[in-house]
């Protein structure tokens, strides 16, 4: 369970940032699976969404986010602002998911 506030904005509505800890990141590299490749090839013939790859990338993204959150917690943060995610192909059939942001301590306003 994720107890951190994660936003793509530099501020958090209803909160004020009281301390900034710096850059935090998480990344993972995933390779395609031959079984998924076969199903994807069949789906390519008839058209439609390739659910197997969507699930693979979603799992990779969650793993990278978890790593980023662990790093923010280890620094004392309870939130991550200015979060960004990127995906890159790094080899034949391999993709890297990278997420990063700024770890902060935020307190409710008022």
Image (tube, rainbow, N blue to C red):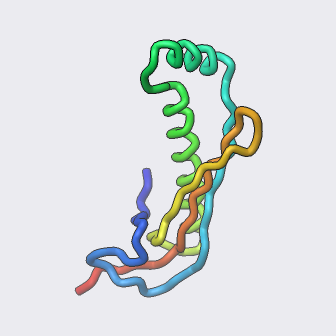
The residue that appears at 59% across and 16% down in the rendered structure is 41
Nearest the viewer among 38 and 63 is 38
Nearest the viewer among 85 and 106 is 85
Q: Total of numbered circles in the picture?
A: 0
Horizontal and vertical percent for residue 52? 52, 25
Q: Vertical placement of 96 versus 108: above or below?
A: above
The residue furthest left is 110
The residue that appears at 50% across and 33% down in the rendered structure is 54
Horizontal and vertical percent for residue 101? 54, 68
The residue that appears at 55% across and 38% down in the rendered structure is 57
Left or right for 31, reference 58: right
Left or right for 93, reference 107: right
The residue that appears at 57% across and 58% down in the rendered structure is 99
Screen quadrant of the C terminus: bottom left
Horizontal and vertical percent for residue 27? 65, 53
Q: Vertical placement of 80 versus 29: above or below?
A: below
Q: Vertical placement of 89 versus 7: above or below?
A: above
Nearest the viewer among 64 and 48 is 48
Horizontal and vertical percent for residue 26? 62, 57
Nearest the viewer among 54 and 1 is 54
The residue furthest right is 91
């Amino acid at each position: 369970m994720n107890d951190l506030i994660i936003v793509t904005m530099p501020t958090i509505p209803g909160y004020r940032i009281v301390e900034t800890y710096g850059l935090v990141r998480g990344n993972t590299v995933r390779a395609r699976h031959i079984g998924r490749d076969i199903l994807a090839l069949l789906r390519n013939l008839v058209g439609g969404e390739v659910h197997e790859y969507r699930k693979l990338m979603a799992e990779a993204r969650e793993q990278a986010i978890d790593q980023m959150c662990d790093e923010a917690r280890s620094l004392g943060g309870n939130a991550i602002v200015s979060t960004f995610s990127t995906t890159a192909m790094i080899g034949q059939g391999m993709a890297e998911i990278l997420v990063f942001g700024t770890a902060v301590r935020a307190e409710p306003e008022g």
